[in-house]
Image: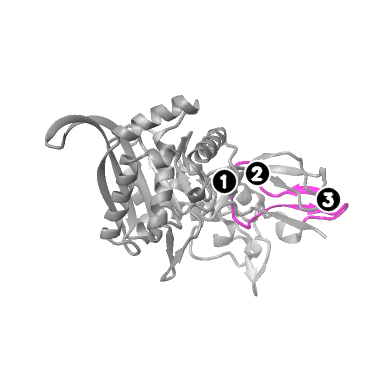
Amino acid sequence: MSEKIVMPKLGMVMSEGAISKFLKNKGDAVSQGEVIAQIETEKINYDLEATTAGVFHPVVEIGQMVEVDGVIGYILAEGESVPVEEQGSGSSGLKPKLIGKNKSPNTKEDGVEKPVRSTPGARRLANKLGIDLAQVEATGPGGRITEADVQKASSSASSQGDRGLSVLQNADRIEELAGMRKSIASHMKNSLSSTAQLSFFLETDVTDVQQERKSFSKEKNTPITMGHILTKACAESLKRHPEFNTVLSDGKIGYYDNINIGFAVAIKGGLIVPVINNAGAKNIQEIIKESDLLAEKAREGKLTTEEISGGTFTISVLGSVDGFTPILNAGQSAILGVGRSVEKPVVKKGKIVIREMMTLSLTVDHQVIDGAAAASFLRRLQQILTRPQPLLA
C-alpha cells in the first residue's frame, strides 16, 4: 500500500517549504531511513528521509512551495500505481493562486476529491500562470475547462490586482517576496498585529565591562564579545523577573521554567535566531562555546530544527547604530536590542569624564509586562553590567 510523503513542520511558525533537491529519481527503489530529498524552509535546510522501503514517486517539482502536511510524493509498493487523486492533477499540497468565485464542478463531491476535467492546453496554461484549475469556471464541452476559461480567469485575477500593481508601475525592477525574506515579512507583520509592543531605552556605562571583557579574553585565551556577556546578564536578570520569560496565548499567560535565549545572526538573505537552551544554568565559558558553535552553523546553513526552536527571550545586537526598536519573536513577551558602544563625555561624581556608553532597547508585550517592570528589568541589567566580575567567574 502506498505511503504519502508530506511536508514536515520544522518550526513553530513554519507554514510551507520547498524541495531544493531530489536525491532519488522517480521510480528509484529506496530504503527506510534513506535521504530522498532536501527541504528548504524559511530558516533551515532539512534532509527528508523515507519512512518505509519502496519505489519513490514525487508529485512536486524542485522549487515549488508546499504547505505543511501537503503531499510531496509517495512511496509505492512494487508494481503499485499512484493514487487516483494524484493522476493528472500535478502537485498535491501546493498552495496555488486562487482566482474567481465559481469552482469547477469537477473538484469535490461530498468531500471527495475528483480530478479536474480540462484540456491539455488548459492544464499547460494554468501551470504557466500559476492558476488553480479547481477555481476556474468551465465552459467547454462536457464541463471541461478550456484555454479560454483559464485566460478569462487570469484576466479577472489581474484586474483585481491592478491596484497593487499601480504602486509598482514606476519601479525599475520587481521581484517576488520569497523564501526567508517572505517568512521574516510575515512573522514581523503578524507579531506587530497580535501584540501590544512597547519599547524602552536605557543608556548604560559599559566602560568597566569592556575592560573586564578584554582582560578575560587575554587571561583565558578565549575571545569573548559583548553578545556573550549580555546573554549571561539577561539570563541572570530573567531569574529575577520571570514575567519576561513568558508567552500570552488565548487569554492566558504561560510561564517558562527554562531560560532559553535566542540571539539574532545575520546570514545571506535575512536573519536567523539560534537558541541557547537553559542559558540560566550555564556559566560564561559554556555560553561562549555554545553560541559560537551555533553562530558558525547558522552561517553555514547547518542548524537543526531543535537549534532554532524553543526560545523564550531574544537578544539582537546591531553594532552599527545607537539604538532601535526590536520586534518580538512569536511565542515570546520580550526582546532586547543592543546598539553600539561609543565614547561620550558624561558627568561622574560632579566631573565630566569620557566613558564608553551603550544603549539598551527593550521591547515588551504591554499586555503582559507593565512599564515599571520593564524599567526594573533594564535597571537590573545595568547593575549587572556595571559590576561584571560575577558574570565572568
Q: Callout 1: 10 Å neighbours few (<14), some, many (20+)?
A: some
Q: Which element is circle 3 on?
A: strand
- The earlier-in-sequence mark between 2 and 1 is 2
Which part of the image, by quadrant, shows the N terminus? Answer: bottom right
Question: Colour mode?
Answer: one colour
Name the residue that disc number 3 marks.
Answer: 54
**In the image shown, does 248 or 271 lie closer to the viewer?**
248
Residue drawn 35% across the image and 55% down it: 192
- The earlier-in-sequence mark between 1 and 3 is 3
- The numbered dot on residue 61 is 2
- The numbered dot on residue 173 is none
| Residue 264 figure quarter | top left
Which kind of residue does numbered mark 3 sit on? Gly
Q: Is residue 115 above or below residue 169?
A: below
Measured as percent of width and height from the top left, residue 194 is found at: 38, 61
Q: Is residue 198 above or below residue 285?
A: below
Q: CA distance from mark 2 to mark 1?
A: 28 Å
In the image, 340: left or right of 31? Answer: left
Which kind of residue does numbered mark 1 sit on? Glu
